[in-house]
Amino acid sequence: MRIGELARRSGVSDRSLRYYEAQGLLASERTPGGQRDFGEWAVDRVIRIQALYAAGLTSKKIARLLPCMRDTDGAPSEIATPRLVEELHAERERIDRTIADLIRSRDVLDEVISAATSSFPAARHAGASSTAV
């Protein structure tokens, strides 16, 4: 499939796909005309790459991890090294800390909102909420 179709099917821009290829995260064949040609597997690969980026992993770490993830046939093409597994645990702990920080920030905002809205006169507050849509 051409890069435009892969972009459409995976929800990722052409530019991102070219970047993934430059980073060694995605591979394509070339047509005689020099256009990129991706296999069906590329859609799942791009979705995985997006998920790993969303988790905060770098392209270098993703490149090391992708071969250890299960392919469409259900088998990993490589076995993860103990060091890579250790790094992934560290990434997970970092994400857990970030989530905890965000929850604390949300709790502080809830307290501020509660304090700010408790000072509203009851009639004005009730009127504001009944007219808001």
Image (tube, helix red, strand yellow):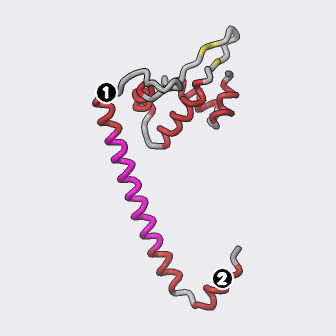
Above or below, 59 relative to 125:
above
Whether residue 91 sits left or right of residue 1 in the image: it is left
* Amino acid type at mark 1: Thr
Tell me which corner region of the image, top left, top right, bottom left or bottom right, holds residue 2: top right
Residue at which label 1 appears: 81
The range drawn in magenta is 89-110
Dot 1 falls on a residue whose secondary structure is: loop
Q: Quadrant of the C terminus?
A: bottom right
Residue at 67 percent across and 12 percent down: it is 31
Give the x, y percent position of residue 97: 35, 53
Ranked by sequence position, the earlier of labels 2 and 1 is 1
Residue 84 point in image, percent of width and height:
33, 31
Q: Residue at x 57, y 90 (%)?
A: 121
Residue 29 vs 107, above or below: the answer is: above
User: Residue at the location (63% across, 88% down)?
Assistant: 124
From the viewer's perspective, is the residue at label 2 or at label 1 nearer? 1
- Relative vertical location of residue 36 with respect to residue 15 in this rendering, above or below: above
The picture quadrant where one finds residue 36 is: top right
Q: Secondary structure at mark 2?
A: helix
Residue 16 sits in which quadrant? top right
In the foreground, 58 or 68: 68
* Residue projecting furthest to the front: 74
Magenta-highlighted stretch: main secondary structure? helix
- Mark 2 residue type: Ala
Q: Quick check: 91 left or right of 19?
A: left
Q: Is residue 5 left or right of residue 111?
A: right
Which residue is under mark 2? Answer: 128
Magenta-colored stretch includes residue 103: yes
